[in-house]
Each structure stands twice: as structure tokens, then as C-alpha cells.
Amino acid sequence: MTPTRQILFVQGGGAGAHDEWDDKLVKSLRRELGDGYEVRYPRMPDEGDPGCARWSTAIRREMADLGDDAVAAGHSVGATILVNTLAEQPPGRGIAAIVLIAAPFVGPGGWPGDEFELTSDLGARLPPGVPVHVFHGLGDESAPPAHARLYARAIPQARVHLLPGRDHQLNNDLSEVAEAIRISRPRPAPHT
């Protein structure tokens, strides 16, 4: 029997985001992945006012409950806080991939940040050998598509997926995300 692969999906911010918006993304992801995957979708604290400290603590707690070969994914500000959390303190267990969906870039060229800024060496601070996928709809009016290019510069190993005709919610269709998750496996870290 093949073990179930776990995906942690971190919601975006805003009042009602968990139940009224990102639940559609999670339903799409579950449908596209099918059997053999468990999509965990925890409610982040105070979703109407997402704070890095509160959300990072919740993300670390959720990551501690995952097995090896899990995928860490996030949408919108949840993705931004997720990648910052992973860069600040990589998880104790191996993860298979990091997936950022419609993530605003906080730092030079992107949005200003009160609690943190993503730095130009972000890729070097992430767990080595872990594939990073950045998905962004070209019709996103919430987080500009140019932010995906900022992630590409800060995370040189990232694979950027720019999706024409897709909005901030990727039109509630995560079929491309599911495909990236299916094929993602960590690469061995280079020997130094």
C-alpha cells in the first residue's frame, strides 16, 4: 500500500478567506490530486488581520505534524508568510516541495512590509534541494503578476508558472498546481 502524501495548504488573509475563498482552492486541489493525498487546511489565527508572528507559529506547529515527503503550499499572503517562515527556520523534517500561489512579494520592488522583508538571498535560506514552484495568474488584480518575477530573482531555483487569463484565485482551478505536486521530489543537496 502506498503511503498517503501530505500537503499543508496555508490560506490567504482577509475576513472570510478560509471558508468563502480558499476553500474553493482546496476543493480543486483535492479533486485534482485524487487518492493518495491528504490536503491539510488549517484555519490561520485572526485571518482578517494576518500577522507574521501569529501565522508563523501556527505554520511551524502544522509542519511539525507532517511526515517526510510532504508539500508546503500557500495562497496569497499565506504563501508569503509560509516562505518567510521556511527561510527563517527550515522544518525539522524533509519536505518535497514549496508551492507559492499568487504570493505578494514583500520587499524591494514589491510591497512594503512592517514585520519582515523577503531578501535577495531567499533561495539560499530555503531548505536545500527542495523544488520551489511559484504560480501566478496574469489577470491577478490583487497581487501584481510582476511579483512572480521578484520571487524568481530572490529564489533562482524556483520554477515560475505564469498562467494567462487567471485571477488571484487562479479561477479556482489548481490543476497545474496538482501536477507540480505530483512530480515534485526533493533533489539531493549538493556536497560542499
Image: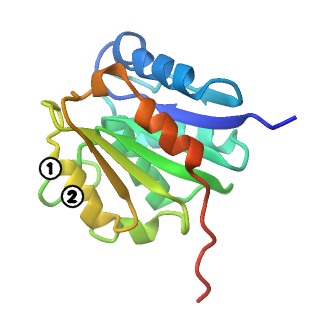
The answer to whether 98 appears left or right of 165 in the picture is right
Residue 167 badge: none
Out of 17 and 68, give the one closest to the viewer. 68
**Which residue position holds label 1?**
146
Q: What amino acid type is highlighted by mark number 1?
A: Ala
Query: Whole-Å distance between the Cαs marked 1 and 2?
Result: 7 Å
Question: How far from the left and from the top, in percent, is residue 179?
Answer: 50, 39
The residue shown at (45%, 60%) is 87
Question: How far from the left and from the top, in percent, is residue 30?
Answer: 56, 22
Q: Residues within 10 Å of mark 2 (few under 14, many from 20)?
A: some
From this viewpoint, which residue is outermost toward the bottom?
192
Out of 39 and 122, give the one closest to the viewer. 39
The kind of secondary structure element at disc 1 is helix
The residue shown at (74%, 34%) is 4
The C terminus: image quadrant: bottom right
Question: How far from the left and from the top, in percent, is residue 186?
Answer: 61, 60
Question: How far from the left and from the top, in percent, is residue 64?
Answer: 67, 44
Out of 133 and 122, give the one closest to the viewer. 133
- Would you identify the image quadrant in which residue 177 lies? top left
The answer to whether 8 appears left or right of 1 in the picture is left
The residue shown at (47%, 63%) is 126
The answer to whether 39 appears left or right of 2 in the picture is left
**Vertical arrangement, residue 52 with respect to residue 30, above or below:** below
Circles 1 and 2: CB distance less than 8 Å?
yes
Q: Residues within 10 Å of mark 1 (few under 14, many from 20)?
A: some
For the question of whether residue 18 can be seen, the reply is: yes
From this viewpoint, which residue is outermost toward the right?
1
Q: What amino acid type is highlighted by mark number 2?
A: Leu
**Which residue position holds label 2?**
150
The answer to whether 130 appears left or right of 20 in the picture is right
**Vertical arrangement, residue 152 with respect to residue 53, above or below:** below
The residue shown at (56%, 51%) is 184
